[in-house]
Amino acid sequence: MEEKLEAKVLLVDDEEEFCNMLSERLETRGLKVNAVLSGEEAVNRAAKQNFDAIILDLAMPGMDGLQTLRRIKEIRPDLEILMLTGHGTVKSGIEAMKLGAEDFLEKPVDMKVLLEKISEAKHKRMLILEKKSQQEVEEILKSKSW
């Protein structure tokens, strides 16, 4: 029996029908999905909430995926972002990775692959947060005179 992945995901895609369909598919597999339709909404949501992974469309009107990635990483460098595109190029994939994207996937996305990438992103983020907490505890202990 397949183990359900419990993760909180932000899905960002300007295609509302695709966003709804992918949200439903992820939620049936145990994920908690927040979906937004623009880069601006994604930046606002990421600033206020924690997510195990963000699935971000590359090609969007207004603030595109690369601009959104850059803005989210400026305010929340700990968030793991998976880029998703139907129009990807090697150049845009490389640029996304340089800006801090965890991975770059093409539409139509294979659900098994996407779930594996979300799981990896969640695990990596947990390790980063654990290390950060450990460093904070060490700093507190160093500051005490006992």
Image (tube, grey):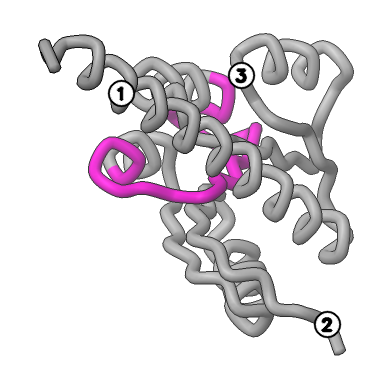
Residue segment shown in magenta:
45-66
Q: Residue flagged by tag 1: what amino acid is it? A: Glu
Amino acid marked by disc 3 = Gly
- The quarter of the picture where residue 21 lies is bottom right
Q: Nearer the viewer, mark 2 or mark 1?
A: 1
Mark 1 secondary-structure assignment:
helix
Task: Please name which of the two marks, 2 or 3, marks the residue nearer to the observer.
Answer: 2
Q: Which mark is residue 136?
A: 1
Q: In this view, does 71 lie to the left or right of 15?
A: left
Q: What element carries label 2?
A: loop
Q: Marks 2 and 1, Cα distance to the nearest angstrom?
A: 37 Å
Tell me the residue at 37%/32% (across/down): 133
* Residue that sits furthest to the left in the current view: 145
Could you tell me which quadrant the C terminus lies in?
top left
Q: Which of marks 1 and 3 is in front?
A: 1
Disc 1 crowd rating (10 Å Cα; few below 14, some 14-19, many 20+) is: few
Along the polypeptide, which appears first: circle 1 or circle 3?
3
Tell whether label 3 touches label 1 (CB within 8 Å).
no
Labelled disc at residue 2:
2
Q: Is residue 130 above or below residue 4?
A: above
Between the residue at mark 2 and the residue at mark 3, the CA separation in whole angstroms equals 30 Å
Residue type, numbered disc 2? Glu
- The quarter of the rendered structure image containing the N terminus is bottom right
* Circle 3 residue: 100
* Residue 93: x %, y % from top left: 79, 21
Q: Which residue is drawn at 58% across and 63% down?
A: 19
Q: Which of marks 2 and 1 is nearer the N terminus?
A: 2
